[in-house]
Amino acid sequence: MLRPGGRAVIVSTDWPSLTWNSSNPERMTRILDAFSEHCPHIALPRVLVPLLKTAGFAIASQSILPHFNAIYSPDTFSSLTAGLIASFVPGRRGVSEEEALAWLQDLRQTGERGEWFFSLNQYLILVEKPTLRE
């Protein structure tokens, strides 16, 4: 809810855009499938603008916030995201804690071999609540 003339910034992640190099693509798919339970709409950016317009907001601007890491480092967005995912997925969609830890270890080893690749898109949308017309 915004007052007339108010503005808001929305940042939304398109989780299906996530690309991550893994030596075990099947396990990667299982892990990311389990992680999809972390939010009610994993592809919200794809439908957000029409929803906002229907709710009466004007779209002032839209831009992409790409996240890309081509090297492994424990302090990168991708490495921190991996830890978050590994802590979330155990017990979801048949993923065990052991499988989540093996996935995380595999990612680290991929990075140590110089094969790290991570890409994820987020979208920034600036909305405005139109002023009341008299």
Image (cartoon, rainbow, N blue to C red):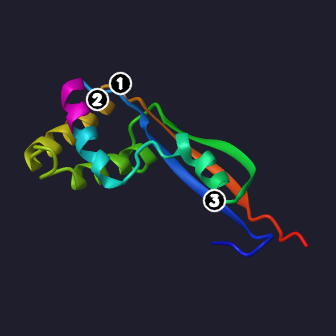
Which dot, 1 or 3, sits closer to the camera?
Answer: 3
Q: Residue at x 31, y 45 (%)?
A: 36
Magenta part, dominant SS: helix
Indicate the amino acid at tag 2.
Thr
Above or below residue 56? Residue 17 is above
**Mark closer to the chain start, 1 or 3:** 3
Q: Which residue is mark 1?
A: 115
Q: Is residue 29 magenta?
A: yes
Indicate the amino acid at tag 3.
Ala
Foreground of the two, 127 or 24 = 127
**Quarter where residue 58 is shown:** bottom right
**Quarter where residue 25 is shown:** top left
**Residue 65 image point, x, y percent:** 60, 43
Give the alpha-carbon distance from disc 2 to disc 3, as whole Å.
Answer: 45 Å
Indicate the amino acid at tag 1.
Glu
Helix, strand or loop for disc 3: loop
Q: Residue at x 20, y 35 (%)?
A: 30
Could you tell me if the residues under marks 1 and 2 are in contact, i.e. CB atoms within 8 Å? yes
Above or below residue 113? Residue 82 is below
Q: Residue at x 73, y 75 (%)?
A: 3
Q: Which residue is mark 2?
A: 110
Q: Which mark is residue 55?
A: 3
Label 2 crowd bin: few (<14), some (14–19), many (20+), radius 10 Å:
some
Which dot, 2 or 3, sits closer to the camera?
Answer: 3
Identify the magenta region: 24-30
Helix, strand or loop for disc 2: helix
Foreground of the two, 65 or 77 = 65
**Residue 75 image point, x, y percent:** 42, 51
Q: Residue at x 11, y 50 (%)?
A: 97
